[in-house]
Image (spheres, rainbow, N blue to C red):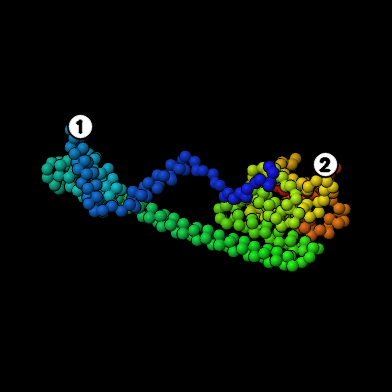
Amino acid sequence: MPFDTAARAALPAFGTMPPGPVQTFRSSLIAGMSRILLGRRSLPVQCAILAVLVGLAFALRKIVDPALPPGFPFLTFFPAVLLTAIFASIKMGILAAILSGLLAWYFFIPPFTAFSLEPSALVAMGFYVVVTATELFFIWLTALALRHVQAERERSLALAQSRDLMFSELQHRVSNNLATMGALLRLQSARLAEGDAKQALVAAMQRLNTVSRIQRSLYSPDAQAIEVDAFLAQLSCDIRESFAMGAEAVIDIKAEKLRLVSDQAIPFGLIASEMIMNALEHARPTAGPLCIRLECARTRPEGSEGPWLRLGIADNGAGLPPEAELSKSLGISISRQFARSLGGSLTLRNRPDAGGALAELHFPLAA
């Protein structure tokens, strides 16, 4: 795409994989149980839940009584106690257990309509007390654990927010400091006449601007990656504005949609910046405007275990100087060191077919 018509795009955050259906269901279930068990209800609402559930349990027990064999006096009251403790409160669950036990003892344990103290009745009531106490104990324990989890979640959220704020503030301060240093270099370079000193200051200023731009794009600790195509477009525009002849140059960018993690983004950006500045500064086409073409795409060299990235920067200038002169260039020396730090290589050669120079950067992409 012609770079002159490209807008400066914001760098999107590095996304995460969505959770699976099992994990989603489990999270929803836990969240729902937490809301039910930890929810605060008014006393009238709790009493209404207690009355409805115990009343329904008693009515249902009366209805099914003719069909039940002897020995099931608490059949419908156990769920009533459980549901009251869950949907009302533990205290209401205890009260429901007491009321249900009294109703079952009076109406469904022989001799009926009397609080019998016979051994069989006392054994049945003892069994009922043990079961309901166990129910209520585990519901209370579950609510206690959920409160602890909720408190830990709130504490973790507060720590995460504090971390994000501190991280963003740090990135912001680093970016501002670099931008300030770049502005000082720009002011100093404006006081100098054309020459090696001014070119050195302009190059140093551009390196600081490149690092500052990458820092600014990584404000969020969860967005530790940059979009290569948008970054190259932004970088090329800024470099053109730094050079007096930038307006006369045509820069085309053909970049694949891919992201670079922060550890690779800064060396990559500095190498790309150096090569574009080198082309703008030294390439002198014999006819027509200077044309610079950037190509960036994934590759997979033979024998490699994963994908690599190839960045090619070609121009239509007069070609490269001898290797002895290239070795004296600070920018090229820096770029080659950064390429080695990425585990890759930077090669520069002339293009015999089309004329001009070609710089190629190859390095393995981080997982």
**Residue nearest the observer in this picture, 193 or 74:** 193
The label shown at residue 354 is 2
Name the quadrant of the N terminus.
Answer: top right
Whether 298 is drawn above or below 67: the answer is below
Residue nearest the viewer, comparing 255 with 345: 255
x, y percent for residue 187: 70, 66
Q: Is residue 246 left or right of residue 286?
A: left
Q: Residue at x 40, y 56 (%)?
A: 148
Q: Position of residue 72 (x, y in %)?
A: 22, 39
Q: Which residue is denoted by mark 1 in the rendering?
A: 67
Position in image of residue 151 (x %, y %): 41, 57
Q: Nearer the viewer, residue 327 or 352?
A: 352
Please, what secondary structure does the residue beneath circle 2 have?
loop
- Categorize mark 1 by other alpha carbons within 10 Å: few (<14), some (14-19), many (20+): few
Q: Give the residue drawn at x 78%, y 47%.
A: 289
As drawn, is 165 to the left or to the right of 181?
A: left
Q: State whether residue 80 appears in this view.
A: yes
Can residue 342 be seen in this snapshot? Answer: no
Instruction: Provide the secondary structure element on which disc 1 rests.
Output: helix
Residue depicted at x 43% and y 43%: 26
